[in-house]
Image: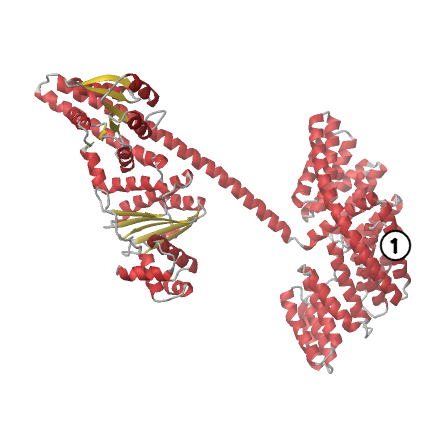
Amino acid sequence: MKTRILIVDDHPMVIEGIKALLASADHVEVIGTVSDAFSARAFLKTTVADVVLLDINLPDLSGIDLCHKLKADFPALAVLAMSTFKERSYITRMIEQGASGYVLKSVSGAELLEAIEQARAGRLYLSPEVAQVLLSGPAPKPIPLLTSREKEVLICIADGLTNHEIADKLFVSPLTVDSHRKNLLAKFGVKNTAALVKIAVENQLI
Amino acid sequence: MRRLLLFLVLLTSPTVLPKAAPPNPARDSLLTLLGKARTDSARVQLLLDIGKLYYTARESRPWIDKAMALSQRANYPVGIANCLANYNYYLYIEGKYDEVLKNCETAIRIVQPRGVHKTLGVLYNYIGNVYNAKGEQRTALANYLKALNEVSQAVVPPHFPITIEGNIVKLYSDLREFDKALAYGLRVIKRAEKVGAINAAGYNCQRVGSVYVALNQYAKARSYFQKGLNMARQTQDPYLEASLLANLADIFSHYGDVPKALDYYDQSLKLARANQNYEIEMWSLHGLAIEQYHKKNWQTAYDFTQQARQIAEKNQYNEYLTSLYLFLSDIEIGRGRLDEAEQWRDKWEKLRTKIANETVLRATQELETQYQTKQKTAQISALQQQQQIQALSLRQKNILIAGLAGLVVLIGIIGALYYRNTQNKQQLAEQENQINRQTIKQLEQEKQLSAAEGILRGQEEERSRLARDLHDGLGGMLSGIKASLTAMSGNQIIPEESAQSFSRVIDNLETSIQELRRVARNMMPEALVRFGLRDALQDYIDYLNRAGGQPIDYQTFGLSERLPQATEIIVFRIVQELLNNVQKHAGASHTLVQLIRDGERFHLTVEDNGRGFDTARLAQQPGIGWLNIRSRVDYLNGTLMINSAPDKGTTVDIEFML
C-alpha cells in the first residue's frame, strides 16, 4: 500500500517543490496539502494519513505545538518535522514532542524518501546535518569553568582574606569582589564560603 | 486691584548684619593691636573682630575658634557668648537654624544676668531672623523688639539698630499693622540718613512707600519711592533701583499716566534683566502687560504675561502665579477666546486650591505658634516693664481674638506671609534652585532615555519582522525552487555539459540560501524570541563552533526562566558584538561565555585568551562596536568592566540588575 502523505506548509512554492521531489516515487502518494495547523487537524479528522510532513513555522500555531496535538490525537501518525532551522533548540523540542524525524528543507528527493521510509517504520530519522548539530554540542562539564577573575578571587577567599583585603590585593573595588564571590556561590550551588572552598579544593581548582 | 495686594510683598531686606571692608590692611592693624593687648578679654574681642573681616566661614572660623579657646581657658564667659554669637552668622547662612537657636539660648543664659546689652541685642536679632526665615512672624517680631530694646541700652555701631528696625518695619507691614510700620519706618529713615547709611535708608523708603500705597496715600508713596530711588542710584544698588522703578511705574499706572508708567516699567525691566532679578523682571512684565490690557492690545498683553508666567513657574512664585493665570484668563476673554480663558481659569483654580491647602496648614501652625508666643511674651512683660512689649502682647491678644473671629481674613494674610516666606527662603537658599534644575535635567534625560527605548524597541521589532520574512519567506521559497529544479533535472534527459552547469546552478542556489539564513539569523534569531536567551545563545555558539575557528565554551547558571524579552534581545546583541570582536581581533584559541542569574542580579562574562589590547587607548578611541556595547549596557543601567593587556587575553564583565 502506498504511504499516504499530508504536507503542511504555508508556502505554496515549498509544497510544489516537495510534490515534485516525491513525484517520481511510486510507493508514496501525496493525499493532501494544507497551509495551517487548523486545516491540518480538520483534514486528519476526516482522512487517514500515514506520514505528515510538518513545517515548524506555521502562521497560527507553532509546529512544535501542533506536533504535540497531532501525536495526542493520532498516536499512529508519523510526524516528520521540516524546517529551514537547524538550531539545536528547535530540533530537541520537536523530538520531545514526538516527531519521528527532522529534515531540512534543503534535502534531496532521495533523502526525503528515506526519511519517510524510516518514519513509517517507526524509527527516528535525522538529516545528517541535523544529527551533526545534536552531536557536536559541547559535552556537559562536570564542574563549571572558572573565569580568570573568579579564579583569583577564589584563591584569595581560600587564603582567608576579607572582601576589602581581596579588593586591595587585586586592585578592584570591593563591590566587584562581592560580585565575583556571589557568582562563585551561584555557580557551584553552595550557600556559604566554606562549602565553596571545600568544593574548590576537592576538584583541585586552586 | 489684586495687584496691590501683592504689592506689599515685593519687599526685600538684608536681614543680617552687613560685613565690613576688605581684610588685609584692617587685619594687619588688628593683628598689631593683638600683639599689644594686655587683657584676655581685649584679645578675645580683637580675634573676633579679625574674624568678622572675612566673608567666608572657612576663613573666619579659625579666628572665632581661637577666640573661643582663649575665652574658655581664661574663664571669660562673656567671651564665650560673643563667640557663639559670631558662629551664628555662618550657621544662619548655612540654614542651620536649630543650631543658631541653641547657641543663642546658651549665650543668653550667660550674658543676661550680666546685663551685656550689646551681645543680647545681637542674639535676639539672630533669633528674630531665624523665626522670620521659618515664617513665624510674630515670634520674630517679638525678638526683634527685644533686640532693639537691648541695643538702645548699649553703645553699638549705628547700622545695627537700623537693621533691626528695618526688619521690624517689614514684619509690621507683613502683618498689616500699618501705623506701627509707618512709625518705625519713618524713624529708621531719619536715623539712617543721619548716620549716612544711605542704602539702608533707601530700602526703608521703599517699605514706607509700600505702606502708604496700602493706605491709599499715593502722593506720599510716590515721594518716598522717589527718595528711595535717588538713594539707590547714589549707592549704586541696581536691585533696589529696579524694584523702585517698578514701584513708581505702578503709581503712574494708578494715576492713569500711561506713557510714564510704560517708561518706568521698561527701565525697571531692562535693569532687572541685566542683573538677573527675576522677581522684578516678572513684576515689570506684568505691569507692562496690564497697561497693554487697558489699551486693548490683547496680543502684546498676552505675550508679556506669558513671559512673566514662565519666570513665575520656573522660580515657583506660586502666589504670584495664580494672579498671572487669572490675568491670562481675562486677556483671553478680552480677545473672545473663551475656551482658552476657561483653561487658564482652571489652572488658576487648581493652583489656588493647592496654595489654600498649604496655607490652612500654615494657619494652623501659625495659630499654634501665636498661642505659645502669647504665653512667652506675657512672661516677659511681667519681667520687663517695656511699653512696646506690653503693647505687643495686648495687641497679640486682640489680634488673636480678631483672628479667631475672622479666620478667612487671617488666611488671606497668611497667604501673603507664606509667599513672603517662600521668597525669603529662596533668597537664602539659591541652591534649591540648582537642585530643581538638576531634577529637570534628570527628568529630561529620563525622557530621552524612554525615547531611546522607543527607538531601540522599534529597531528590534523591525529586525524581527525582516528576519522572519527573509528566513521563512524568501529562504523557504528558494528551498522550494531548489527542490523543484532538482526534481526537474532528474526527470529530464540533459546533455552532459548542461547537466554540469545545471548542478552548479543548484549549488549556487544552495549557497545563497545558506547566506540568506545566516544574515537573517544574525538579525534576529527565531530561537531568541521563541525559546529565550539561553537556548538562542547555545544555538548561536553552536553555529560559530561548527563554522570553524576556535572553540567557544558556554555555560549558564540560573537561566531556567526567561527574562523580559527586551532584556534578552539586548544581552544577545551584546554577546554577539563581543564574540564578533573576539573573532575579528583577538586571534584566541579559546573563549568562554558565561551567564549567571543570581536573584535580581545578572552577570555576563566573555573571556578569551587572545592578544588583548591596551585599555587606555580604548578609553580614548572606542570603535563603533564598543560604543554599541557601552550604550546597551547603559540602557540596562549596568556596569561594564574590561580587563585586558597586550598578550594577556581579554575579559569583559557586565553586570546589571533585573
Q: Nearer the viewer, residue B205 or B336?
A: B336
Q: Is residue B583 visible?
A: yes
Around disc 1, counting alpha carbons within 10 Å, would you say few (fewer than 14), some (14 to 19), or many (20 or more)?
some
Q: Chain of mark 1?
A: B
Residue at the (45%, 47%) spot, across then down:
B637
Would residue B527 appear left or right of B587 to someone viewing this image? right
Above-or-below relation of B408 to B27:
above
- The colour scheme used here is secondary structure
Residue at the (73%, 64%) spot, across then down:
B101
Residue at the (84%, 58%) spot, across then down:
B374
Q: Quadrant of residue B284?
A: top right
Q: Quadrant of residue A23?
A: top left
Above-or-below relation of A171 to B466:
below
Would residue B333 appear left or right of B638 to someone viewing this image? right
Q: Residue B552: x, y in percent?
A: 26, 47
Q: Nearer the viewer, residue B318 or B204?
A: B318
Above-or-below relation of A66 to B600:
above
Q: Residue B424: x, y in percent?
A: 72, 52
Q: Quadrant of the C terminus of chain A?
A: bottom left
Q: Quadrant of the N terminus of chain A?
A: top left
Q: Secondary structure at mark 1?
A: helix
Above-or-below relation of B283 to B615:
above
Residue matched to label 1:
B397
Residue at the (82%, 38%) spot, across then down:
B1
